[in-house]
Amino acid sequence: VAAAAAYVSRHFGGEAVMLVLSADHLIGDVGAFAAAVDKAVQLADTGKLVTFGIRPDRPETGFGYIECGDLLDVEGCHQVRRFVEKPDLETAQAYVASGNFLWNSGMFCFQASALLEAMEKHAPDVLEVILRALETSDTRQQPFELSREHLDRVRDVSIDYAVMERAENVAVVPAAFDWNDIGSWNALAELTPADAAGNRVNGEAVLIDSHACYVQSHGRLVALVGLGDLFVIDTPDALLVADRRRAQDVKRVVQELKLQSHDSVHHHKTVHRPWGTYTVLEEGARFKMKRIVVKPGASLSLQMHHHRSEHWVVVSGMAKVVNGENEILIRTNESTYIPVGVRHRLENPGEADCVMIEVQVGDYLGEDDIVRFSDVYGRQ
């Protein structure tokens, strides 16, 4: 958010208003959402840091809360008295009963300059490193990546902790639109209709004598027999089986994986890159198979590998390939072989996605075995 504010301020002026939204929210009533944003912009134009509060319909322990203070000139909006962390059930019940608390949606609106001034006061160490990262990044490329060297030194802190909970000029717009923070499996399950036994299924599943379960699987059939109140989440990356009443404890699994330095913390089976995606289909001793999709007009970096060779087979579309000193066009059902240590690049010159299968063979197949010589996205 700090980097975005600095970029907006530099290119559009400090008075430009930013709307900051999370990616995992679902809002159905777009008209009511637009009306709330309208109020937020009015407040932001006066220099306020604005957040959106959701009126609670239940004592939810998985959300943070906002306590409303004095009414402001913009209809229905309040000064923020304080932010409070995720409460226990008894405290959450008291908050809902009081009528003076809102769920913290994690959505914000402010002028770029207002956010930068607040960061200068409350989180100057974060802002200093972010500004250096922005200054050393090639922002002419779209999209561009911030300097990893500087980003690695940024303190791990959210905008809530760093700024919003410390600033004095914070306002809240009570939201009249429907809102779902799809940040837990319980929240996601609610989006799927339930059967007579309270089961919700997203994908292919057979449930026998089971109740109140949520099953998500798009890769294979899942069968449950004699079970209740469970999540069964089957993805290409991992399988999760958990008690629905302990949805918030899933984060402990992630913490444990980080402690183990497990590869899944950093890499999914499908990985998004500026040029497209790759999906690991299978891997074993000395080999890995990927499905690679390159967007029209996009290009991978000019690179080489010290420990692996690669075989490329185009499944659909067309690829322009640099292979050593040669530049060739590979069409559907054609292939090329790239030996260890040879410079190579893949580009999609067509108007449709280029889809290909890559087979890697070697004694080390890690993603860090890439030596880049040039890259249109500024990666090192």
Image (cartoon, rainbow, N blue to C red):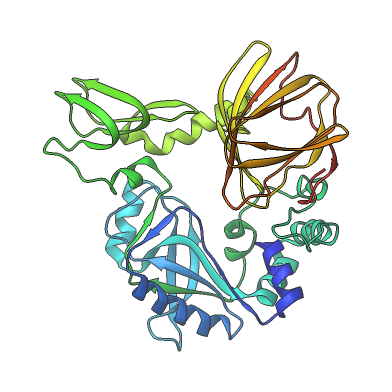
Between residue 313 and residue 54, name the one nearer to us: 313
Between residue 42 and residue 34, name the one nearer to us: 34
Between residue 302 and residue 83, name the one nearer to us: 302
Q: Position of residue 328 (x, y in %)?
A: 76, 37
Residue with the most extreme left position: 196
Residue with the most extreme top position: 285
Between residue 270 and residue 161, name the one nearer to us: 270
- Please state if 322 lies on the left or on the right of 335 as rendered: right
- The quarter of the image holding the C terminus is top right
* Residue 198 against residue 107 in the figure, above or below: above
Q: Position of residue 220 (x, y in %)?
A: 35, 25
- Please state if 224 lies on the left or on the right of 246 as rendered: left
* Residue 187 against residue 364 in the figure, above or below: below
Which quadrant of the structure image shows residue 225? top left
Q: Can I make out residue 371 in this image?
A: no
Q: Can I make out residue 358 in this image?
A: yes
* Residue 152 against residue 235 in the figure, above or below: below
- Please state if 190 lies on the left or on the right of 324 as rendered: left
Q: Position of residue 335 (x, y in %)?
A: 67, 28
Q: Position of residue 318 (x, y in %)?
A: 63, 42
- The quarter of the image holding the N terminus is bottom right
Q: Residue at horizontal 82%, vertical 57%?
A: 137
Q: Residue at horizontal 25%, vertical 31%?
A: 229
Q: Residue at horizontal 25%, vertical 32%?
A: 213
